Amino acid sequence: MRRRVLTELTGAPTARQLEAELRRETYRRTYLRALGRALSVLAAAAVLMTLLLRIFPVLRIRGDGMADTLREGDIVVAAAYGRCTPGSVAAFYQNHTLLVRRVIAAEGDRVEVDGAGRVLVNGTLLDGPCAAGGQVGLRDAVLPAQVPEGCFFVCLSCGGSEPDGRSALIVCADRDSVVGRLLFRIWPLTRIGAVR
């Protein structure tokens, strides 16, 4: 009784009040520490994801220009590093449009078209869409042509809805316009696999 009266007179907290305040402070520190850790993990994950998407961009295919390999709606992973070599599939910008096409010739290669409209690279006849004949041309240049340094040639495939309506058109793309070389299809699940 005397202790309670003293506590009330002096305004000092009771033992229960001190214990309750200690529990609240411990909980607050634990909560803040956990929140700090969670925010640090989220920030690190965001930075890592940003870096990964810069190195391995993810693209959704639109159109039917690569119908022999890719379909409308496919989602693919590309590699933003390395060279686009003949036979690989590259994503690149051409006239502010993102295109996905197969590389047919690298810098220094000689590209020509024979009398039947078939495409030859370094004297070797190509297989595939560009070899189908028809109206074949090189935008802003005359064939035969040598691929300039820092560039590669792609073939807009036959039968697709191409920008200028031709059946096939060879395009010279600058290496700086490349988004990436397509590596892997991740969607749809039934067709997951390497892009060949």
Image (tube, rainbow, N blue to C red):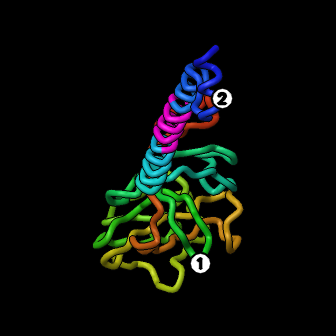
Q: Which residues are magenta?
A: 26-39
Q: Amino acid at mark 1?
A: Asn
Residue at disc 1, secondary structure: loop
Mark 2 surroundings within 10 Å by alpha-carbon count, few (fewer than 14), some (14 through 19), many (20 or more): few
Question: Which of label 2 and label 1 is nearer to you?
Answer: 2
Q: Give the amino acid type for the residue marked by disc 2 in the picture.
A: Glu
Q: Residue furthest left?
A: 108
The picture places residue 168, in percent across and down from the top left corner, at: 59, 66
- The residue drawn where x is 54% and y is 76% is 137
Residue corresponding to mark 1: 95
Numbered disc total? 2
Residues at circles 2 and 1 in contact by the CB criterion of under 8 Å: no
Pick the residue in front: 17 or 142.
17
* N-terminal-most mark, 2 or 1: 2
Q: Residue at x 66, y 70 (%)?
A: 166
Q: Quadrant of residue 112?
A: bottom left
Q: Residue at x 69, y 48 (%)?
A: 72
As displayed, is residue 190 above or below residue 172? above
Residue tagged 2: 8
Q: Position of residue 57 (x, y in %)?
A: 49, 53
